[in-house]
Structure formats: C-alpha cells, structure tokens
Image (cartoon, grey):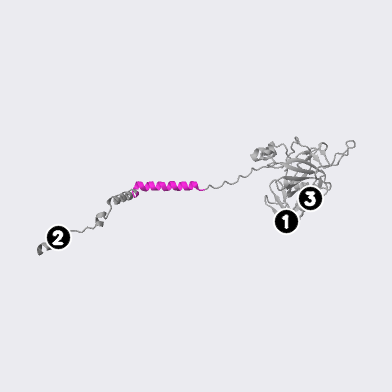
Amino acid sequence: MKKRFSFIVTLLVALPLYSVNNMAAPLIDLGAEAKKQEQKSATTSPVAKEKDQTTKVADHQKKAEEKPKAKPKPKKPPHWGYFEKEGPRYWGELAPEFATCKTGKNQSPINLKPQKSVGTTSLPGFDVYYRETALKLVNNGHTLQVNIPLGSYIKINGHRYELLQYHFHTPSEHQRDGFNYPMEMHLVHKDGDGNIAVIAILFKEGAKNKALAELMPYLPTRLKKQEIHEFVKIHPAKFFPADKKFYKYSGSLTTPPCSEGVYWMVFKQPIQASVTQLEKMHEYLGSNARPVQNLNARTLLKSWPDRNQENPVYELY
C-alpha cells in the first residue's frame, strides 16, 4: 500500500503545474510583434526614407512661401524740371499723379490784367502774425526755400493758415499785362485741413533790398541739404510792399503735382531789389518759372474798388 502511494506522489511531482493565469494569455503576442516588425522595416527602407525626405522638403518650401514678403520700397516720384522733356510742357505726362498739370482748368500762374479784373470792397483781407526765427535754407533742386517753424501765420476771415516756407522764382511766374518781372517770391501757408493759401510778391529793379541782402550771403552750396544759421533772423513781413492791395483768384501749385484749390493773393505793388541782387539770384536759381496758364472761366478779383472810368489814372509799374 505504501509503495502505491509513493508512486502517485512521484507522478504528481513530475507533472508541470499550471495556474489559471497561465492559461489566460501567452507570454508573447506573436501577432502584435509581427506587425511591429513590418512597420519598422517599412520606415527604415530606402523608399520610405526618400519619401520622408521629400515630405520634409515640401514642408520647408511651404513654410518659406508662407513667410511675409518684404514690403516693396515706395516709388520715387519722377524727376521734373524746367527744360526739354522734363519741362512744364511735359509735366502732365511724366506720371499719373502729375496729370492735373495737363488737364486742370484752374492752373497757376496767370497773366494779371488790372483792366479786366473785378474790383470789390467786400474781398476779405488777411491779418499777419509772423515772427522772427532762425534762418533755415535749402536748395531743393528747383528753388531756394526758406523753411519756417510753426508759430507764424495769417488769418483770413478769422481762419488760420500756418506759414510753412517761402521760396523764389526767376523770372516771375505771374505776369502783369503780359510781362514778367525779374523775380517773384511765394509765401506758402496751410490750414489744419490741408488747404493752401499763397501770398506772391513781385520784384522789380530799383534800390537794394535789405531783407534780401540779409539772406543772400547764406545761399546753400549743397543740394537738398538744409543749412541752419541760428543767429540770422529775417522777419518774412520785411518783404511786404508798403501798399497792401492784392489780386485774388483760385489757382494751383505752380510745380508738380499742380494741385488745384489754392487760394492766391498777389500783391499789386512790386517791391524793389538792386540789379546786382536780381542778377545774382538768377545766376543761382536759373530759369525756374512755369509759363502762365489760361484763366478759363475764373474771375480775377482785386481788393480795391474800380476807379471812375471817366477819369482814368495811369499807374507806374
């Protein structure tokens, strides 16, 4: 009996033991492992590498295209002048923004004809509030310009126009009964809405001009470079004639883009400058006057009433 029991125990020891957990799942999922091996093989193959590289290059190009492009540099306005193909006759054809120089109907300058102008006592005058400032000169390639800081202005009907600058033309741009004066000065004003008012002063040969004499020793020798002379102060009103009567009309800038809507006031009485002064200014500036333009439907006004035509008074120019 003992031998039989011993044999059974020995047999049980020799048989492998399995638990419920051992029967639930294999130690290795052969299907999943095979799938992993296939994926690894696919990503390491030459074809896959080449495809991956192509994708990276395409992504890089796409990102480069998505980068913001550099802003184009602002286009410089075309060069214009007073002679040949760049002269006043061709200004309106040099650029689209200059078209008004050709098509405009209210252009400046004009021929001032006192006998055909309309006298009035209701034409508003202007009050002057200028001050002395440091002399700031620049030769901008077209004229001699004196820049004025804010604080000098005129008032027309109580409306304020700041004086921005004044400059010179030789010969004059405006004519009087078809004749040009040796030189003309423009004082350019602007209000807060961008409207422009210009006061024009004509020069004739005569006595030495003191205000011009203060300015001329400092004529710039460099182009488009502002030169400041802090201790030289010229009051702009020193150029005004004693007689403040003026012609008034609606016109334009006399240089490109020839914008219209400019309020023009041209003093009736020219001021004097010596022959030497006028010759030197002409040598420095050259001829920088735009030819006169058609008056068209405009009316030239004057700030004084017409005289009795029965007793005409002949004026000395």
Return the residue found at the far front: 1
Q: Nearer the viewer, residue 103 or 238?
A: 103
Q: Image quadrant for the C terminus?
A: top right
Q: Which residue is mark 1?
A: 229
The residue sitting at 69% across, 37% down in the picture is 102
Asked whether the residues under the numbered discs 2 and 1 touch, taking CB atoms below 8 Å apart as contact, a structural biologist would say: no
Left or right of residue 86, residue 1 in this image: left
First in sequence: mark 2 vs mark 3:
2
The location of residue 307, given as percent across then percent down, is: 87, 39
Magenta stretch: includes residue 304? no
The label shown at residue 128 is 3
Q: Nearer the viewer, mark 2 or mark 3?
A: 2
Judging by the rendered image, the residue that carries numbered circle 2 is 11
Q: Earlier in the sequence, mark 3 or mark 1?
A: 3
Disc 1 on helix, strand or loop?
A: strand
Query: Of helix, strand and loop, which one carries label 3?
Result: strand
Q: Is residue 107 left or right of residue 42?
A: right
Q: Residues within 10 Å of mark 2 (few under 14, many from 20)?
A: few
- Residue 141: x and y in percent read 68, 47
Locate residue 282, reporting x and y percent.
Answer: 75, 46
- Identify which residue is drawn at 41% across, 46% down: 55
For this rendering, which residue is in front, 10 or 118?
10
* Total number of numbered discs in the rendering: 3
Disc 3 marks a residue whose amino acid type is Val
